[in-house]
Amino acid sequence: MDYFPSSKHRHFFPTIYFSKTARKVGELSNVVTALKQWEFASKSSTELLQLLQDPSTDAELRSLAAEELESTSNGLISSANALKTSLIPVHPFANFSCLLEIRPGAGGSEAALFAGDLLRMYQAFCKRHNLRSTILKLEDAKTTGTGSDNEIQEVVLEIEREGAYGLLRCEAGVHRVQRVPTTETKGRTHTSAVSVLILPNFPSDGKEELGQDSFNDPGSDYYIEPKDVRTDVMRARGAGGQHVNTTDSAVRLTHLPTNTVVAMQDSRSQPKNREKAWRLLRAKIAQARREAREEEKARMRVNVVGVGKMGRGDKIRTYNWSQQRVTDHRSGITLHHLDDIIQGGDSLDKVMDSVRIWLSDRDLESLIADEDAAVT
């Protein structure tokens, strides 16, 4: 039997099957590689211990074995951590590109200014890592008529690279800033907060990565019933421009069951704004459905074994200007390199790496809790 279709019929073949299979093989190969490395390190460690415990081992060989045992023990710990990480199921959105949404919270204009700082931080991070980033939506205070163009009300940054969601999901949550605002005349430190949301960025038709009927299957996270969405068109707001206040180019979508609202007016074209709005709405609904399931499982784990998780509404990180300090409240890491972090430098990588390790540990705890709950 010919398992490879001829070029005449190749476009009918389900390439999504090969894509998913190749990805699964890659995940399993990571487990196999990590297991082999752990077995090798474990075997080497055992052999060295036997040499040290053997009274017939001469002094020179014993000395060499003792030196080798230290590096081998470190390798065993490293391979054990790699094996642990490889066994954790990959997040279902991990391989997607992503949308990074930033919104100011408590703190008024200072929060809006800090939202701009975070936008530039992530743009610098993306540039340093050769990640293509594009502003999908930007509303500043000048656009809404409430302040200057440095005060961001909402921004959505599209990061177009496979795996960007898995790379940046550690940034979701409330970022707190403590500093003296430029408008403060008495030198008092103010505390403000900004919310960062990481959303999966799905293909336009859902077929390439999600499967042939993902957007049309009512059982899918990606499905939205069209009748559940109210569409409003309006004239764009802003300080001026050829399309502002002259054509009904702005689009607002409201998902009625969840009251999720998405508005888009960045393009002069209503169809383009509509397409962008649907992408953002679909991402928000899918993320919300996924988080709802994770939160329900987390509540069950707390009841069974006391294993919980932080939600996106929790304070995850503090940026203290006077102390030049950044503390992540999940991993516990504290660095006094605030300038480098806010510029998207290497110190930001260190913070994010520590959080990814923390996330892996929590995922492993959850996996063990699920297994224990299944046994009982």
Image: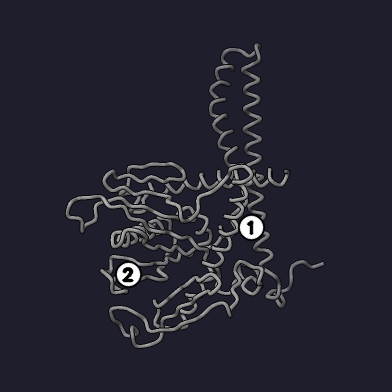
Nearer to the camera, 139 or 338: 139
Q: Earlier in the sequence, mark 2 or mark 1?
A: 1
Give the residue at the far right of this rendering: 1
For the residue marked with disc 1, what is the amino acid? Arg
Residue at coordinates 20% horizontally, 59% vertically from top-left? 183
* Front residue of 337 and 148: 148
Q: Position of residue 148 (x, y in %)?
A: 26, 68
Q: Nearer the viewer, mark 2 or mark 1?
A: 2
Q: Can residue 188 be seen here?
A: yes
Q: What percent of the width, then of the height, locates residue 104?
A: 36, 62
x then y, percent, for residue 320: 31, 47
Q: Is residue 44 left or right of residue 108?
A: right
Residue at x 28%, y 81% (from the top left corner): 240
Identity of the residue drawn at 54% across and 26% down: 70
Depth check: give the residue in front, 22 or 173.
173
- Most extreme residue toward the left, as rendered? 185
User: Which quarter of the figure is the C terminus placed in?
Assistant: top right
Compare residues 46 and 268 and report the one nearer the observer.
268
Q: Secondary structure at mark 1?
A: helix
Count of numbered tags:
2
Looking at the image, residue 65 lies above or below residue 305: above
Residue 215 in which image quadrant: bottom right
The residue tagged 1 is 23
Disc 2 and disc 1: Cα gap in Å? 40 Å
For label 2, the SS is: strand
Circle 2 crowding by C-alpha within 10 Å: few under 14, some 14–19, many from 20: many
Disc 1 packing (10 Å; few <14; some 14–19; many ≥20): few
Which residue position is annotated with label 2? Answer: 140
Q: Residue furthest bottom?
A: 246
